[in-house]
């Protein structure tokens, strides 16, 4: 009865388009009332969820990404990417993909990546004759690397929920992010050839060197962050603070970060962090409630019995999370469903770091999948293209991402090679 009330009310509220954080909170209150548990636990669990040192990494990485975007660094990264791949067929589409991968290493967020790169490339792609639908679909799909390439906010949340090393998760996300980037470049080449988009002239090695020098300091940030983490100089949370400070220094050094721009960056970072933490607080109460009702343990045992082996279980997890990802906010989904799926994964002997990458890739694909993929809405707002038109154009990219997901799932060295080497 309690299980039905909790999940039934959550689904009903979501169908009524109630915001996900409010839906989780109300569903939790309903469950507490039915379970005859004092509502004081809501405040206690919310405070307990917030009272976490690792979670401090989230607002600081969000702030670092906003500062980098406001300080002109996204434009410099796009310029460097353009010097490398802009002369290829569908060059600006390739720039969107490669530039997003560069920016992902600064922001850790799909939404921030789509907004930053889309804002820079939307007009140039339109001027070069790219169809608006194609532009929007490419920009949205390219943002998927934002939650995979370190520093990834989703991987931080997964590490927080499971206790798995965030440093190992960051290391494991590097090759999957590169794989996704390369596969999207290949698909963009195929689609742009079909679109009849002409090549542009290669600007030469001197242009690569010039644009590299302009983008050197933004490109150096992920190197400093990751080498500091794996060198034992600072923790992932401290790395987030270093990233924000580094963004400030570089932005002022380039003389493109004004006081007004800084205020806007802090404002956007505060709003984004508040949304994430509100979802985390409500999800923390919800996760505690289902745990004390033995729901994760029962569901995990049920899933283990149905699957019977690791291969089928991972296939089930992928199908399930792809559906969840296109219906629910990724931050909420990773807190709730990791608690349910993780125990069975461990019983099958699945590496916890690999499982974190699988979960994050699934939920990242969900951000570009209808009906509620958040990146679709951001790309729509930037390009002024309807969601329906973007959905028609983005399916080839989604199919490629699913192939990448299967490779990552069933060929663990893609994720675990660097962890075994340096972890």
Image (spheres, rainbow, N blue to C red):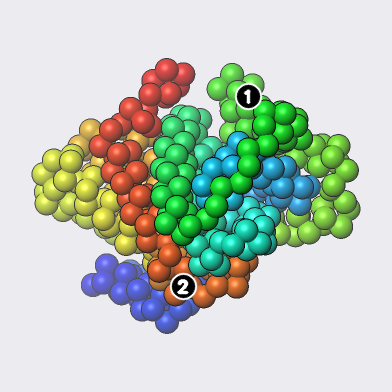
Count residues near mark 2 (Cα–Cα under 10 Å), then give few for <14, some for 14-19, many for 20+: some
Q: Earlier in the sequence, mark 1 or mark 2?
A: 1
- Please give the residue where the numbered disc 2 appears in the rendered image: 389
Q: Is residue 307 left or right of residue 80?
A: left
- Residue 412 at x, y percent in the picture: 30, 31
Q: Looking at the image, which residue is at 82% across and 55% down? A: 261
Q: Looking at the image, which residue is at 78% across and 59% down? A: 264
Q: Looking at the image, which residue is at 42% across and 37% down? A: 179
Count residues near mark 1 (Cα–Cα under 10 Å), then give few for <14, some for 14-19, many for 20+: some
Q: Residue furthest bottom?
A: 16
- Residue 163 at x, y percent in the picture: 43, 37
Q: Is residue 301 left or right of residue 404?
A: left
Q: Is residue 51 left or right of residue 301?
A: right
Q: Is residue 150 above or below residue 317?
A: above
Q: Which mark is residue 346?
A: none
- Please give the residue where the numbered disc 1 appears in the rendered image: 228
Q: Could you say which quadrant of the image residue 247 lies in?
A: top right
Q: Secondary structure at mark 2?
A: helix
Q: Is residue 309 above or below residue 341?
A: above
Q: Nearer the viewer, residue 198 or 276?
A: 198
């Amino acid at each position: 009865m309690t299980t039905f009330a909790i999940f039934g009310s959550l689904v009903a509220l979501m169908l009524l388009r109630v915001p996900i954080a409010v839906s989780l909170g109300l569903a939790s209150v309903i469950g507490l009332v039915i379970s005859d548990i004092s509502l004081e636990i809501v405040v206690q669990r919310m405070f307990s969820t917030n009272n976490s040192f690792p979670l401090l990494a989230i607002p600081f990485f969000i702030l670092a990404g906003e500062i980098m975007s406001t300080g002109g660094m996204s434009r410099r990264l796009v310029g460097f990417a353009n010097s490398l791949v802009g002369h290829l067929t569908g060059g600006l589409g390739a720039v969107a993909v490669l530039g997003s991968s560069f920016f992902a290493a600064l922001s850790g967020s799909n939404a921030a990546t789509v907004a930053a790169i889309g804002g820079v490339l939307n007009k140039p792609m339109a001027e070069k004759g790219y169809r608006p639908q194609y532009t929007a679909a490419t920009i949205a799909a390219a943002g998927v690397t934002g939650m995979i390439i370190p520093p990834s906010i989703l991987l931080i949340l997964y590490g927080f929920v499971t206790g798995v090393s965030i440093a190992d998760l960051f290391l494991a996300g590097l090759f999957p992010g590169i794989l996704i980037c390369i596969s999207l470049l290949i698909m963009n080449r195929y689609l742009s050839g079909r679109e009849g988009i002409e090549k542009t002239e290669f600007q030469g090695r001197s242009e690569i060197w010039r644009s590299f020098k302009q983008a050197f300091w933004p490109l150096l940030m992920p190197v400093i962050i990751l080498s500091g983490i794996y060198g034992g100089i600072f923790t992932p949370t401290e790395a987030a603070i270093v990233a924000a400070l580094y963004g400030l220094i570089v932005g002022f050094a380039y003389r493109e970060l004004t006081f007004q721009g800084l205020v806007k960056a802090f404002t956007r970072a505060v709003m984004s962090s508040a949304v994430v933490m509100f979802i985390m607080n409500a999800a923390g109460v919800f996760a505690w409630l289902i745990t004390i009702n033995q729901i994760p343990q029962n569901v995990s045992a049920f899933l283990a019995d149905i699957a019977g082996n690791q291969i089928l279980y991972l296939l089930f997890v992928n199908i399930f999370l792809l559906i969840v990802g296109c219906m629910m906010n990724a931050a909420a989904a990773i807190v709730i469903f990791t608690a349910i799926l993780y125990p069975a994964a461990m019983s099958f002997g699945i590496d916890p770091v690999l499982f974190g990458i699988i979960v994050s890739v699934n939920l990242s694909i969900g951000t570009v999948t209808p009906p509620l993929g958040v990146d679709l809405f951001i790309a729509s707002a930037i390009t002024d293209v309807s969601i329906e038109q973007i959905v028609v154009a983005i399916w080839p990219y989604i199919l490629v991402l699913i192939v990448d997901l299967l490779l990552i799932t069933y060929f663990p060295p893609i994720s675990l090679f660097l962890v075994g080497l340096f972890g």
